[in-house]
């Protein structure tokens, strides 16, 4: 059974960079066939796709966030990561990592709340 | 504003059926058979309920069904049960020119 777990600071100051890591267990990121994704949910709001990465390192980003987002993968640790730069209060959200298999998100992490505040 | 349009709320009594719509464009819902539906209970991660318009993952009750006509996809929940009360989100592949993945704004399903 594949499991994903987000980790990282729960509080980030405005203008700084938000950094989160997703650790995958029960399956290998390197096995191919999947895109490893970041999705966020503003408090009380809907879901917003941030981007995803293939094990080879190919990345695909939401155009509205592309200038501030970097997603990377570390296959040796079976992890992938999110960096979001120049954050503001509008980036306060629950951040989920998820596995995209053939254009469906079939496994999700539990989510982690990141608050942007001084 | 979400790329896909869903009604904010829907409701039904136990045992009844309810249908939730998800309207997009020919660049997303209408252009691909990659519409998915997710169920989210409060404080929990979303759960995949329907993929590729009408397919159910293993373990999802057959009370949940999906369909699509043109640029609008639909999720139908039959034989409503109390545990079906949740938020439901649709999603569609949108191709490289439209940002790859788009979600609906979500529908709060209330079981009366």
Image (tube, helix red, strand yellow):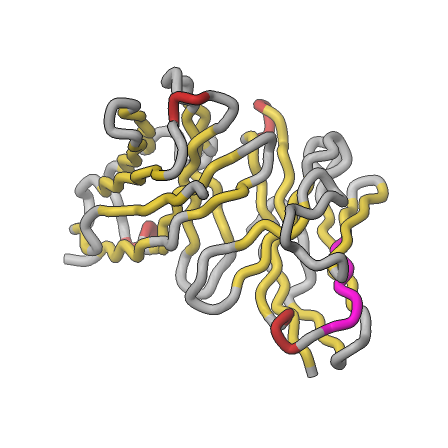
Taking depth in this image into account, of B69 and A116 the one nearest to the observer is: B69
Residue B94's image quarter? Answer: top right
Residue at the farthest right position:
B69
Residue A22's image quarter? Answer: top left
Quadrant in which the C terminus of chain B is drawn:
bottom right
Taking depth in this image into account, of A13 and A26 the one nearest to the observer is: A26
Please, is residue B97 above or below residue B41 in the view? above
Q: Position of residue A11 (x, y in %)?
A: 19, 55
Residue B61 as seen in the image, left or right of residue B106: right
Residue B106 as seen in the image, left or right of residue A1: right
Residue A11 as seen in the image, left or right of residue B97: left
* Residue at 26% over, 45% down: A87
Taking depth in this image into account, of B10 and B75 the one nearest to the observer is: B75
* Residue at 51% over, 55% down: B46
Based on the picture, tell me whether residue A73 belongs to the magenta stretch: no
Residue A20 as seen in the image, left or right of residue B101: left
Q: Position of residue B84 (x, y in %)?
A: 64, 69
Please, is residue B79 above or below residue A84 in the view? below
Q: Which residues are magenta?
A: B74-80
* Residue at 84% over, 40% down: B70
* Residue at 70% over, 59% down: B61
Based on the picture, tell me whether residue B77 belongs to the magenta stretch: yes
* Count of numbered tags: 0
Please, is residue B9 above or below residue B27 in the view? below
Q: Position of residue B29 (x, y in %)?
A: 72, 38
Please, is residue B73 above or below residue B79 in the view? above
Residue at the farthest bottom position:
B112
Q: Position of residue B26 (x, y in %)?
A: 76, 33
């Amino acid at each position: 059974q594949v499991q994903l777990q987000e980790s990282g600071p729960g509080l980030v100051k405005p203008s700084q960079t938000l950094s989160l890591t997703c650790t995958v267990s029960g399956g290998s990121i390197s096995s191919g066939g999947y895109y490893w994704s970041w999705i966020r949910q503003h408090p009380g709001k809907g879901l917003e796709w941030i981007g995803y990465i293939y094990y080879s390192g190919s990345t695909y980003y939401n155009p509205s966030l592309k200038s501030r987002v970097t997603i990377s993968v570390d296959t040796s640790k079976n992890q992938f990561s999110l960096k979001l730069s120049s954050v503001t209060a509008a980036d306060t959200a629950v951040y989920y990592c998820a596995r995209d298999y053939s254009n469906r998100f079939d496994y999700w992490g539990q989510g982690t709340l990141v608050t942007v505040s001084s | 504003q979400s790329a896909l349009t869903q009604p904010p709320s829907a409701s039904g009594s136990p045992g009844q059926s309810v249908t939730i719509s998800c309207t997009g464009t020919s660049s997303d819902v209408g252009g691909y058979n990659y519409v998915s539906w997710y169920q989210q209970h409060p404080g929990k991660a979303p759960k995949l309920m329907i993929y590729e318009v009408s397919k159910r993952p293993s373990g999802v009750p057959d009370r949940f069904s999906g369909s699509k006509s043109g640029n609008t996809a639909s999720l139908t929940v039959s034989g409503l049960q109390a545990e079906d009360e949740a938020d439901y989100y649709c999603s569609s592949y949108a191709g490289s020119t439209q940002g790859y993945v788009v979600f609906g704004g979500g529908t709060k399903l209330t079981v009366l």
